[in-house]
Image (spheres, rainbow, N blue to C red):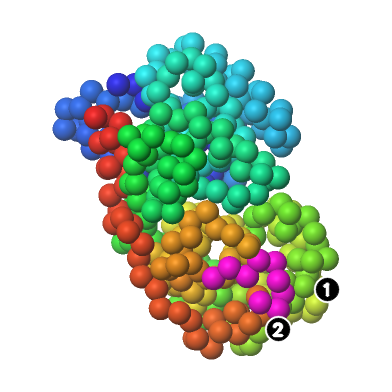
């Protein structure tokens, strides 16, 4: 069986790494399964640090489509065109896609037009806001997929409610957790724990700092409102330093907000390699983020987490885990930061099948 595993952005690699490691393990035991890892972007993508693949213990992509546009419609068209040519040159039985990007949808469409089996990791996630481009992508990808790998019960019920046949839907658990278990003894303490002269940050102690991450374009693009959110954090953090590993526009906008409000213990630092960022978040007192992946990892590590969104695709992180949603409401954010700093947080437990064997289950199902 020849599998093409497609990634469209840096976070996708975290979700396919456990699958690739499971494939390699099966190959070592004589399985005839093979794969090629394809990245829709370019080899010099600045968001992908050279150490990432070593950190994940997988080889870099075999091939790159080289699509670097930021226009969603242009991305869709270019990926469709180049992926069709790639399939012409590389015999493939099964295409595995991840998440909900425009490039993921483009690959899914081409795969089905070519009559190939399509499998979707992280299927059944919904915001129920059709105005969001990613929501359109999710509906298309799930609708086309022959196999839907879901992370939890809520994702399963969504897929079934939308008409997916029971035989197509497999609740395999959260594949991100495989990496956390796999790398538990490999995390790297960042050098910035000794202090960061560039940002003026003092030395950090485990469990005595907050982490802030920001990625959503809507939040970054509304600087005036973002400043009220940053102010809410700064007002309640007290003596607890806030560490913000940010890149590009996000770093510049947050730095501007911090300067405008005169925040003293809120530090923007350079992005960290995967194993260092995992150490930073695993040992934090709390996390404030707009990233679903970061919130999921916080639940695994039982670290209090505030998500700057009114919904989450993985509601288990709220229902059972350490995550709390505050939308983009500065007062709610301030209240929860105050709770976080004063150690007034809910107890949490691990959702079902966060056992580190999701990659194995995915590969077994593909083989069967």
Residue drawn at the location 49% of the way across and 74% of the way down: 304
Residue 257 in view: yes
SS for dot 2: helix
Q: Residue furthest left?
A: 29
Residue 267 percent location from the top left of the image:
66, 72
Question: Dots 1 and 2: beta carbons under 8 Å?
Answer: no
What is the quadrant of the N terminus in the image? top left
Q: Is residue 27 above or below residue 213?
A: above
Residue drawn at the location 54% of the way across and 78% of the way down: 209
Q: Judge from the rendering whether residue 152 lies leftward or rightward of residue 49; answer left or right.
A: left
Whether the magenta-drawn stretch holds residue 329 is answered as yes
Q: Nearer the viewer, mark 1 or mark 2?
A: 2
SS for dot 1: helix
- Label 2 neighbour load within 10 Å: few <14, some 14-19, many 20+: few
User: Looking at this view, is 152 or 274 the one in front?
Assistant: 152
Residue 332 percent location from the top left of the image:
66, 77
Q: Judge from the rendering whether residue 23 lies leftward or rightward of residue 306; answer left or right.
A: left
Residue 215 percent location from the top left of the image:
65, 55
The segment highlighted magenta reads 324-332
Q: Which mark is residue 235?
A: 2
- Marker count (numbered): 2
Residue 118 percent location from the top left of the image:
43, 27
Q: Is residue 292 above or below residue 141?
A: below
- Label 1 neighbour load within 10 Å: few <14, some 14-19, many 20+: few
Residue with the mark numbered 1 = 260
Whether the magenta-drawn stretch holds residue 336 is answered as no
Q: Which mark is residue 345?
A: none
Residue drawn at the location 60% of the way across and 85% of the way down: 338
Residue 278 in view: no
Whole-angstrom CA distance, mark 1 to mark 2, is 14 Å
């Amino acid at each position: 069986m020849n599998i093409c595993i497609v990634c469209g952005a840096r976070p996708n690699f975290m979700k396919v790494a456990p699958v690739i490691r499971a494939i390699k393990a099966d190959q070592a035991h004589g399985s005839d399964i093979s794969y090629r890892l394809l990245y829709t972007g370019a080899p010099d993508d600045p968001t992908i640090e050279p150490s990432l693949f070593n950190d994940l213990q997988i080889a870099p992509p075999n091939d790159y489509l080289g699509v670097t546009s930021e226009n969603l419609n242009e991305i869709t068209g270019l990926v469709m065109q180049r992926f069709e040519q790639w399939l012409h040159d590389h015999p493939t039985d099964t295409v595995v896609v991840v998440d909900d990007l425009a490039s993921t949808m483009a690959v899914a469409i081409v795969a089905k037009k070519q009559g190939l089996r399509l499998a979707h990791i992280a299927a059944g996630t919904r915001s129920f806001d059709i105005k969001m481009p990613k929501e359109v992508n999710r509906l298309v990808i799930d609708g086309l997929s022959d196999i839907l790998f879901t992370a939890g019960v809520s994702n399963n019920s969504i897929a079934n409610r939308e008409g997916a046949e029971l035989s197509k839907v497999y609740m395999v658990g959260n594949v991100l957790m495989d990496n956390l278990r796999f790398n538990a003894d490999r995390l790297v303490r960042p050098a910035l724990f000794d202090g960061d002269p560039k940002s003026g940050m003092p030395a950090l102690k485990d469990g005595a700092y907050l982490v802030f991450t920001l990625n959503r374009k809507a939040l970054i693009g509304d600087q005036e409102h973002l400043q009220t959110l940053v102010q809410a954090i700064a007002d309640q953090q007290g003596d607890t330093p806030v560490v913000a590993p940010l890149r590009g526009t996000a770093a510049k906008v947050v730095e501007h907000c911090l300067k405008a409000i005169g925040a003293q213990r809120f530090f923007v630092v350079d992005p960290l390699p995967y194993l260092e960022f995992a150490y930073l978040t695993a040992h934090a007192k709390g996390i404030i983020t707009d990233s679903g992946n970061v919130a999921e990892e916080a639940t695994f590590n039982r670290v209090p987490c505030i998500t700057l969104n009114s919904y989450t695709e993985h509601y288990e992180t709220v229902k059972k885990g350490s995550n709390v949603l505050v939308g983009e409401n500065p007062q709610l954010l301030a209240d929860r930061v105050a709770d976080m700093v004063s150690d007034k947080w809910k107890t949490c437990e691990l959702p079902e099948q966060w056992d580190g064997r999701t990659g194995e289950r995915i590969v077994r199902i593909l083989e069967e």
